[in-house]
Image: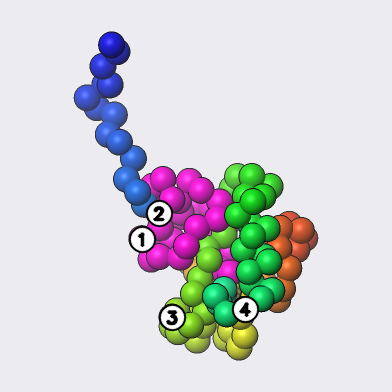
Amino acid sequence: SPKKPANFPAPTITQVQADNRYVDYSPAVYAASAGKKRVLYFYATWCPTCSVANQDFTVNASQIPEDVIVFRTDYDKELELKRKYAITYQHTFVQVDASGNEITKWNGGGIKELLQNLK
């Protein structure tokens, strides 16, 4: 059986997640995704329109451009991020630059709106 080259380490969970296009927000995965277009999606489990969007992103993740990563960001727990981007209600999207500065922000929608709003 072929041997795996010794100099080829297995990817870490963080790297694997950063290669996906729709992932749960964590500082580690966020940091690992530097170089991609990053969108924070402020999601709440109790929000019915968030559930519809979550389903859209989960089922159609391959429609998210390869250079984009959407972070499902917990509206109820990520208070510092909500403060930083002045998020006042759930189902809000914020695209940020490499330094974490807001590029654009929009409310509602799924894949179609993501593609329309990306800068």
Label 1: which secondary element: helix
Tell me, for residue 71, which label it has, or none: none
User: Which is more toward the observer, 52 or 17?
Assistant: 52
Q: Which residue is mark 2?
A: 32
- Residue type, mark 1 in image: Ala
Mark 3 or 4, nearer chain start: 4
Cα distance, mark 3 to mark 4? 14 Å
Label 3: which secondary element: loop
Q: Which residue is mark 1?
A: 28
Q: Could you tell me which residue is drawn at 60 percent across and 45 percent down?
A: 66
Count neighbours of disc 1 (C-alpha within 10 A) and say few if under 14, some if 14 to 19, many if 20 or more. few
- Residue type, mark 4 in image: Cys
Q: Which residue is mark 3?
A: 77
Mark 2 and mark 1 in contact (Cβ < 8 Å)?
Answer: yes
From the viewer's perspective, is residue 16 above or below residue 73?
Answer: above
Mark 4 and mark 3 in contact (Cβ < 8 Å)?
Answer: no
From the viewer's perspective, is residue 55 above or below residue 15?
Answer: below
- Residue type, mark 2 in image: Ala
Cα distance, mark 3 to mark 1? 16 Å
Q: Which residue is mark 4?
A: 47
Mark 2 or 3: in front is 3
Label 2: which secondary element: helix
Q: Which residues are magenta?
A: 15-41
Q: Could you tell me which residue is drawn at 67 percent across and 50 percent down?
A: 60
Q: Position of residue 37 (x, y in %)?
A: 58, 56
Q: Position of residue 102 (x, y in %)?
A: 59, 73
Q: Position of residue 82 (x, y in %)?
A: 51, 83
